[in-house]
Image (tube, rainbow, N blue to C red):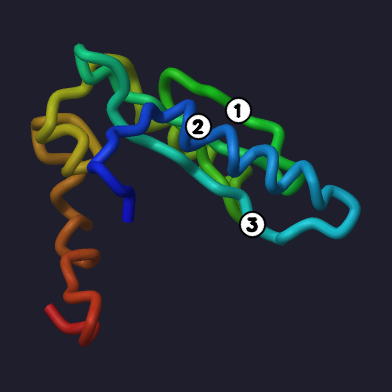
Amino acid sequence: MLAASLSLSCLVVLTPHSRGLGHDRFGPYFVEPVICGLSGPDNKPFIAAMDLIGAPLLAKDSVVAGTCSEALYGMTESLWKPDLVRPQLLLGGPINGAGTKHSHRFARRASTGTR
C-alpha cells in the first residue's frame, strides 16, 4: 500500500517491472507481465506487455501474453477494430448479435464453475 495515497502513472509502474526482469535475464522469471491502466489527465488507455527479459511493448490497440500468444494475436486481429462501442466489446462481435450465440458458455461463476 502506498503511503500518502500517491497516484502513479502507468510508465512509473512499468519501469521497475522492466528493470527487475532485465536484471535477471540469464536466469529469468518465466512471466510476461501485462500492464494496463488509464494515464494522464484525460484518462487515455495505456497498454503494455513485456517479454521474459523485460523488453516493453507499448501498444495502442492490444497486447497478448502467455503460451498461446500467437493464436491470441490472430483472434484479436480478426475481432478488434478501432472505435468499438461497449456492447461490441462485451459480445465479441457486431451489435447485431453474432457474438451472443456463444457468450452464454462463458457466463460462469469463477468460484464454483456453475452458471
- The foreground one among 67 and 41 is 41
Q: Residue at x 10, y 35 (%)?
A: 87
Q: How would you rate the neighbour count of disc 3 (Cα within 10 Å): few for under 14, some for 14-19, many for 20 or more?
A: some
Element under disc 2: strand
Q: Position of residue 83 (x, y in %)?
A: 23, 15
Q: CA distance from mark 3 to mark 1?
A: 14 Å
Residue highlighted by disc 3: 31
Q: Earlier in the sequence, mark 2 or mark 1?
A: 2
Q: Residue at x 41, y 22 (%)?
A: 61
Q: In the image, residue 1 lies at what x, y percent?
A: 32, 56
- Mark 2–mark 1 distance (CA, rounded to whole Å): 5 Å
SS at circle 3: loop
Give the number of the disc on residue 48: 2
Snapshot quadrant of residue 82: top left
What amino acid is found at the position of numbered circle 3 in the picture?
Val
Give the Cα separation between the discs numbered 2 and 3: 14 Å
Q: Residue at x 61, y 50 (%)?
A: 32
Q: Residue furthest right?
A: 26
Residue at label 1? 57
Mark 1, secondary structure of its residue: strand
Is 44 situated left or right of 20 in this image? Answer: left
Depth check: 58 or 91 in front?
58
Q: Residues within 10 Å of mark 1 (few under 14, many from 20)?
A: few
